[in-house]
Image (cartoon, coloured by chain):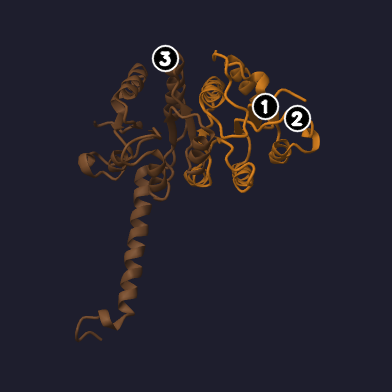
Chain colours: A orange, B brown
Amino acid sequence: MTTPARILLVEDAPDEWRIALESFAESGLMDQTTVVKDRGEALDFLYGRGPFRQRASGMPAVVVLGPTMKPATALSTLGDIRNDADLRRLPVVLMGMFDVETKRLAYAQGANSVVGRRDDPKSRAESYAVLGRFWGWANVPPPGCIPQPKASRP
Amino acid sequence: MNDPIEILLIEDDPGDVHLALAVFRALKIADRCAVANDGEDGMDFLYRRGRFAARKPGAPRLILLDLKMPRANGFDFLQVVKKDPGLALIPIVALTSSREERDVERAYDLGVNGYVVKGIDFSEYRTTLRSLALYWTGVNDEPPAYVERGVASLRAFAGRQLQSLRGNLSNPWLWPMGAV
């Protein structure tokens, strides 16, 4: 069994993980974040299969589709989640540089939020920190997800 | 109110409105926050009718929605707004004192983007409101603009009118006398 993942980050660029994890660390979420590198791993994680058979139970409170994911893949992953009876309510945030139509599609297909990618690493770190504080602490996820922490937030 | 509205707060409890506005004031967004007193009033805001008939067009970046309210409650509001293609994409976060699973589940099923519980501890609740406002007005990218949605709705409306006109043309009973 591993630590339950309150945040599932789908991202394959190590530089991006570092920024995300360091920012989540500020709000005490680093050790509650699991990083997977693509759509396939994300689904394996969510279904608790393959390398994630032994993972701690409970769904993440938010799935973050990272900024280096191709927009089409991010939309397909969102579709996989929304079309599955057991996963459909999971909060999903898409990060990246999206054109107007992709952004509209993301919301229309049920993305909870879309976060534009900031080029400057410092602004990006700030985005992750604010994202972590909202989705990791303030938001009440649907039943079945890792619940909000009871301890006082940082 | 000349600036676009960032947050539409739909809340019937004056104490909760006061608290939320105090947090938004500290973040310097209070003057771009509109308050509606219940779901019906919230719909009046979005559809620019009733006491909001004269407001400038434009959608808020975020709707903060209490769930338990008189007249139209939060669930009634969601049922109407999420079915209107011109409004359905506006992010809505439930802001409620209910932590009941049934309410959380129902709110997500009706399409809320997030669900926040009003805390009993004042300072904790203030921190929650602050994170919420910072995220939804500072980090979240809003859906394509209301104006574009307005145009889309207008197109859909024009399409429906055209279809109905075509229907009328194919029905000789509706032709004016003498028309071929």
- Direction from residue B20 to residue A20 in the image, left or right: right
Q: Residue at x 31, y 28 (%)?
A: B32
Which residue is tagged 2? A55
**Residue nearest the observer in this picture, B153 or A17:** B153
Q: Is residue A8 above or below residue A21?
A: below
Q: Name the quarter where the N terminus of chain B is drawn.
A: top left
Residue B89's disc is: none
Residue A88 coordinates in the image, percent (x, y): 59, 43
Q: Decide if residue B120 is on the left or right side of residue A7.
A: left
- Mark 3: few/some/many CA within 10 Å (<14, 14-19, 20+): few
Residue at image location 62% in from the left, 17% down from the top:
A22
Point out the tag, 1 or 2, that comes first from the N-terminus.
1
Which mark is drawn over residue A5? 1
| Amino acid on which the number 3 mark rests in the picture | Phe
Q: Residues within 10 Å of mark 2 (few under 14, many from 20)?
A: some
Residue B26: x percent and y percent?
A: 35, 16
Q: Secondary structure at mark 2?
A: loop
Which residue is at 42% across, 28% downward? Answer: B137
Q: Chain of mark 1?
A: A
Which residue is at the front of the view, B30 or B82? B82
Callout 3 secondary element: helix
Report whether A13 appears left or right of A109: right
**Mark 2: amino acid:** Arg
- Name the residue carrying label 3: B122
Q: Chain of mark 3?
A: B
The residue that appears at 56% across and 31% down in the rendered structure is A141
Q: Amino acid at mark 1?
A: Ala
